[in-house]
Image: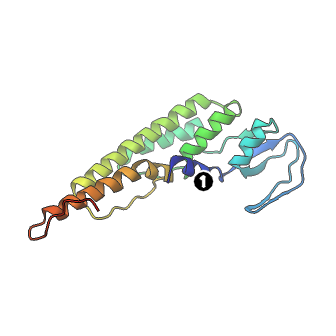
Amino acid sequence: MEPLEVEFLAEKQLVTVIPNFSLDKIYLITGDLGPFNPGLPVDVPLWLAINLKQRQKCRIIAPDWMDVDKLEQIKERERKEETFTPMASPHYMELTKLLLNHASDNIPKADEIRTLIKDTWDTRIAKLRLSVDNFVKQQEAHAKLDNLTLMEINTIGTFLTKSLNEMHKLCTNLQPGERTQSQDY
């Protein structure tokens, strides 16, 4: 899966908007949205919130977890724990990127939030690389990946599967009594 596909999936997450227009319910395949009344909050998928924001039809409310104090706690907890901690959103990185790119004027302390999310991401990716390194060195056959997001798995997935395939080829070619294969399969 490509990062853009993961981002596409993230756009289905619901966010709250404050519309500045009136409209009855919208009936979509994925479910009904609305009604939209000026000044009254309504939950919509991120893709619709961004579209409405671009057309100046709403103000986007940042998710509860997108608060500097909460993100600071998440960052510190991630640094202290040896294993991956649960994240506030399964698409925290994608949501932050999209919301800050399209609605940073609606999000208080947007620059601090961007920095905290990036720090948390860097910590988690470093932890993931270390885990993969240990996994490969110990020649494990399987691993349990708790509390990783789809984007994090996507980041390391291609590298890991190719590495494991090469290790498997090397291990099977080094086994005594088995014929060696000179061609890739």
Q: Nearer the viewer, residue 121 or 116?
A: 121
Q: Nearer the viewer, residue 101 or 168?
A: 168
Colour scheme in the image?
Answer: rainbow
**Which of the 4 image quadrants contains residue 125?**
top left
Vertical placement of 89 versus 141: above or below? above
Residue 111 at what x, y percent from top left?
A: 58, 28
What's the residue type where badge 1 is placed? Leu
Judged left or right of residue 118, residue 171 is: left
Residue 163 at what x, y percent from top left?
A: 30, 53
Rate crowding at label 1 as few (under 14), some (14 to 19) or many (20 or more) other CA atoms within 10 Å.
some
Quarter of the figure with the C terminus: bottom left
Residue at 50% over, 41% down: 73
Specify whether residue 18 is in view: yes
Residue 152 at what x, y percent from top left?
A: 45, 49
Seen as rendered, the residue at the extreme left is: 176
Q: Which residue is mark 1?
A: 9
**Which of the 4 image quadrants contains residue 50?**
top right
